[in-house]
């Protein structure tokens, strides 16, 4: 199975758990419901999202995303700080 499909299934299960947490709150057990929602949210942001970002960028050439200082200096020569025509 593809890793992205696995991450999608994990995300779907986590969203179902969040929905179950809201259902539990509605049924009267607020402490348990908030615990389920909080743990599910932490799982999304600390497990699913970093794995997704790693999967998408593991085979990319990131050298073209580097900041080139010389190119920026060339662009700044034409810039006039008193020119307000761009702001209108």
Image (spheres, helix red, strand yellow):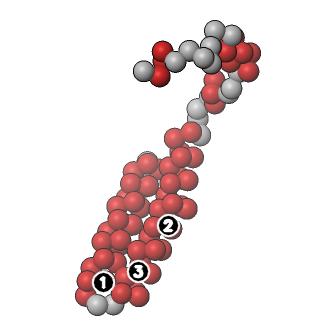
Q: Secondary structure at mark 3?
A: helix
Q: Is residue 27 above or below residue 84?
A: below
Q: Secondary structure at mark 1?
A: helix
What's the distance in space between the residues labelled 3 and 1, CA to CA? 9 Å
| Residue sitting at x 38%, y 54% | 8
Q: Is residue 75 above or below residue 17?
A: above
- Which mark identifies residue 34? 3
> Is 11 in front, or is 36?
36
User: Considering only order in the chain, which callout, 1 or 3, is on the residue closer to the N terminus?
Assistant: 1
Residue corresponding to mark 1? 24
> Is 3 in front, or is 88?
88
Residue corresponding to mark 2? 43
Picture coordinates of residue 9 (x, y %)?
37, 59
Q: Nearer the viewer, mark 2 or mark 3?
A: 3
Please indicate whether residue 68 sits to the left or right of residue 53 in the image: right
> Is 77 in front, or is 86?
86
What's the distance in space between the residues labelled 2 and 3, CA to CA? 14 Å
Crowd around label 2: few <14 · some 14–19 · many ≥20 (10 Å): some
Picture coordinates of residue 78 (x, y %)?
63, 9
Q: Nearer the viewer, mark 2 or mark 1?
A: 1
User: Considering only order in the chain, which callout, 1 or 2, is on the residue closer to the N terminus?
Assistant: 1
- Occupied quadrant, residue 22: bottom left
């Amino acid at each position: 199975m593809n890793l992205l499909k696995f991450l999608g299934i994990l995300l779907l299960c986590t969203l179902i758990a969040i929905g179950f947490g809201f259902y539990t709150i509605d049924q009267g057990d607020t402490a348990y419901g908030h615990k389920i929602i909080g743990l599910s949210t932490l799982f999304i942001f600390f497990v699913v999202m970093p794995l997704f970002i790693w999967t998408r960028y593991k085979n990319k050439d990131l050298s073209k995303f580097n900041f080139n200082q010389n190119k920026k200096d060339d662009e700044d020569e034409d810039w006039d700080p008193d020119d307000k025509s761009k702001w209108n």
